[in-house]
């Protein structure tokens, strides 16, 4: 019996793409930079001898220069000539390259994301179905930027609920006592039935994280996310032992599922761990993370908006919400979220690039036709 002829990668390209700054600009907690200004992002394009291609976008400003350099020095000679459907082998190869290259976390999974996009296009199926497929819609929560006062946050919460968002997550100021007062005020304002979450954006040390955690426990918050930098699993274990509010951890730490496993084993992931294509090694790393968490009956909450994470939300069972960033005042509902606060599964083949950007002609056929919101991160 004659063997199946393998598809081969023939070229790997970097396409710089200008991404606008947030309009209006916004801020994060004290000590962090605010919304990014206009800058150059990057799209990775993988071509094959069968004419099927795959793409993936890194929306980080400045990533175009970094990706172009990596392609020229390392990735092109590693990828050209290989079968793009051998994603598992290529994912492991990226980790081998990371040992000496120390790849930026947001680029580590870019090749994998493009390969999953290619696989979907080859099968003429959306990538979330290629990953297995679990659901066709999921509720979105309103994830705030940082606002100036308690009163403005309460106004934003009212607007979010009026827009159909069923849950709200706070990004506050990075002052444990001030943030605690805000968290309690928001709970009193919206009542007991609205799920609330808090994201510390790694703004606290252990004593302040414990102080705020007690306030969130008393206010019945659903989860407490990244209160400290994720370098010390021991500190997170001590936090978990000290507060009742469930912890959502392992968002920005390197190591994908391997690092997430340490948080879980230590008892520090009392709600669950973060999964995302950008920060967990593409779809392959994110799915490993989700399955790891599921084995311990924990959640794998998908981090951040953008189209790849919509696919991820539809593919895994143990995530609760899609994260939708709301900014400015008044706020608006992210494109693709309906009046009931639901995000629906993408229907086109592969993953798709976000609409609303000035792509070169070679990328026009990959642009999403279902949403219009440009990338924000």
Image (tube, rainbow, N blue to C red):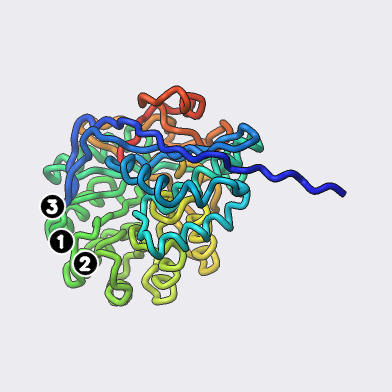
Q: Nearer the viewer, residue 165 or 255?
A: 255
Classify 10 Å Cα crowding around label 1: few (below 14), some (14-19), many (20 and above): many
Relative to 271, say whether 156 is above or below: above
User: Where is mark 1, residue-wise?
Assistant: 176
Disc number placed over residue 252 in the picture, else none:
none
Q: Residue at x 59, y 46 (%)?
A: 81
At which x and y percent is residue 298?
47, 64
Residue on which the image places disc 2? 209
Marks 2/3: CA–CA distance = 15 Å
Which label number is shown at residue 30?
3
Q: Is residue 91 above or below residue 261?
A: above
- Mark 2 surroundings: few (<14), some (14-19) or many (≥20) residues within 10 A: many
Q: Is residue 125 visible?
A: no
| Residue 211 horizontal/vertical position (percent) | 18, 68
What residue sits 53% from the left and 48% below the top?
79
Task: Report, in whole angstroms, how far the alpha carbon at label 1 lies from the one at label 2.
Answer: 7 Å
Left or right of residue 173: residue 301: right
Among the two numbered marks 1 and 3 on one chain, the one whose residue lies closer to the N terminus: 3
């Amino acid at each position: 019996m004659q063997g199946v002829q393998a598809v081969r990668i023939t070229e790997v390209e970097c396409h710089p793409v200008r991404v606008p700054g947030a309009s209006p600009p916004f801020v994060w907690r004290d000590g962090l930079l605010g919304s990014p200004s206009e800058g150059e992002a990057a799209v990775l394009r993988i071509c094959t001898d069968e004419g099927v291609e795959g793409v993936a976008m890194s929306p980080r400003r400045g990533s175009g220069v970094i990706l172009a350099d990596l392609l020229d020095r390392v990735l092109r000679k590693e990828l050209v000539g290989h079968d793009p459907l051998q994603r598992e082998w290529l994912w492991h190869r990226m980790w081998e390259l990371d040992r000496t290259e120390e790849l930026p976390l947001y680029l580590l999974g870019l090749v994998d994301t493009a390969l999953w996009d290619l696989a979907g296009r080859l099968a003429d199926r959306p990538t979330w179905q290629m990953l297995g497929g679990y659901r066709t819609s999921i509720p979105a929560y309103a994830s705030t930027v940082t606002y100036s006062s308690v009163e403005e946050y309460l106004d934003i919460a009212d607007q979010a609920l009026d827009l159909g968002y069923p849950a709200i997550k706070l990004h506050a100021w990075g002052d444990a006592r001030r943030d605690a007062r805000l968290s309690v005020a928001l709970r009193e304002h919206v009542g007991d039935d609205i799920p609330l979450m808090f994201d510390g954006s790694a703004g606290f040390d252990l004593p302040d994280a414990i102080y705020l955690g007690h306030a969130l426990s008393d206010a019945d918050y659903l989860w407490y996310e990244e209160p400290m930098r994720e370098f010390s699993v021991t500190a997170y274990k001590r936090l978990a032992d000290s507060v009742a509010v469930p912890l959502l951890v392992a968002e920005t730490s390197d190591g994908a599922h391997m690092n997430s496993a340490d948080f879980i084993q230590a008892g520090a992931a009392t709600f669950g761990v973060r999964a995302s294509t950008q920060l967990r090694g593409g779809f392959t790393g994110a799915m490993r993370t989700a399955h790891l968490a599921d084995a311990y009956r924990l959640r794998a909450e998908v981090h951040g908006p953008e189209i790849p994470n919509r696919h991820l939300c539809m593919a895994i069972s143990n995530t609760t919400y899609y994260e939708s960033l709301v900014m400015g005042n008044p706020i608006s509902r992210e494109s693709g979220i309906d009046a009931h606060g639901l995000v629906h599964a993408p229907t086109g083949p592969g993953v798709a690039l976000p609409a609303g950007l000035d792509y070169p002609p070679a990328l026009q056929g990959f642009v999403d036709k279902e949403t219009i919101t440009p990338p924000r991160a």
